[in-house]
Amino acid sequence: KINKKVSLYKNGVLINTWNCNVGRNSESGDKKVEGDRRTPSGSFYVCTRNDKSVAYLSLGLSYPSSDDADKGFASGLITEEQRDAIKKAISSGVMPPWNTPLGGAIMIHGNYRENGATRGCVAVANDVMDVLWQYCMLGAKVDIGPFRAFGNQAFWKFHRYFFIIRHIKHSIFVLNKALCLHCPHNPVFIIICLLNFWINALKQSIISLSVK
């Protein structure tokens, strides 16, 4: 976050780097509570997309993370119920609750201003946001802070296998529902579905953003 740069990667290969605005108080530490005007540090994913944003376009991030929930509960900021709700959402790959004392609604959006700052979001120029919107679908990985070397090919190889495994797990769940609704005793149907899911998994590109 110190450099105020956003970098876009595809399968570990840098596509481009652009200037960005971050939370006004980000240099004083990590985000802890609602309203502290800090951009959170950590590993997140895109959990929502808004093409009607007041800030041109926006990609919602999965803050608070499981780690944030654990820290918030340990410090007495959130209840056990709130912690468990956040952790359940993260484990399911969906949007975590944004209405706890930890805050939420951290976005990557347009309306970048030179030497500007935000209330905690990451702002880029609108033409940059057009590019990010094209690449960053739901689930795209976003790392904020100097946490991981995105050019490390060993990391990307591991992450790709992890992504494929997660995709297949979801595919098996969908397949089970399909079998219940269609032809559960038809082996040809089962084989075609499995092949289709495997092909889709292997075709996926790993899109990630780094904010530093």
Image: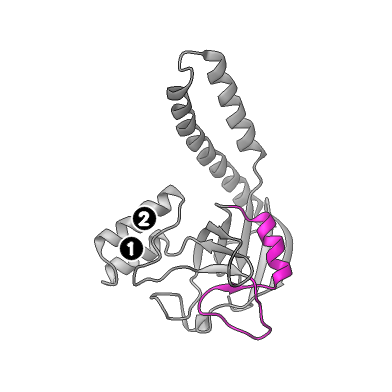
Give the position of the C terminus as an image quadrant.
Answer: bottom right
Graded by Cα atoms within 10 Å as few (under 14), some (14 to 19) or many (20 or more), the crowding at tag 1 reads some
Could you tell me the amino acid type at mark 2?
Lys
**Which residue carries the number 2 mark?**
87
Mark 2 element type: helix
Give the position of the N terminus as an image quadrant.
Answer: bottom right
Q: Residue at x 68, y 50 (%)?
A: 11
**Does residue 96 sit above or below 144 in this rendering?**
above
Q: Nearer the viewer, mark 1 or mark 2?
A: 2
* Region in magenta: 110-137
- Label count reads 2
Q: Tell whether 176 sits left or right of 76.
A: right
Q: Nearer the viewer, residue 180 or 13?
A: 180
Q: Residue at x 51, y 41 (%)?
A: 166
Mark drawn on residue 70:
1
Query: Are the residues tagged 1 and 2 within 8 Å (C-beta)?
Result: yes
Magenta span contains residue 118:
yes
Name the spot of residue 51 as percent of width and height, x first. Answer: 61, 61
User: Which residue is the extreme one toward the front?
Assistant: 52
Name the spot of residue 69 as percent of width and height, x first. Answer: 35, 63
Name the spot of residue 38 as percent of width and height, x first. Answer: 48, 78
Q: Residue at x 51, y 62 (%)?
A: 61
Magenta span contains residue 119:
yes
First of labels 1, 2 by sequence position:
1
Q: Using the numbered discs, state the Cα–Cα distance from disc 1 to disc 2 in whole angstroms.
A: 9 Å
Mark drawn on residue 7:
none
Graded by Cα atoms within 10 Å as few (under 14), some (14 to 19) or many (20 or more), the crowding at tag 2 reads many
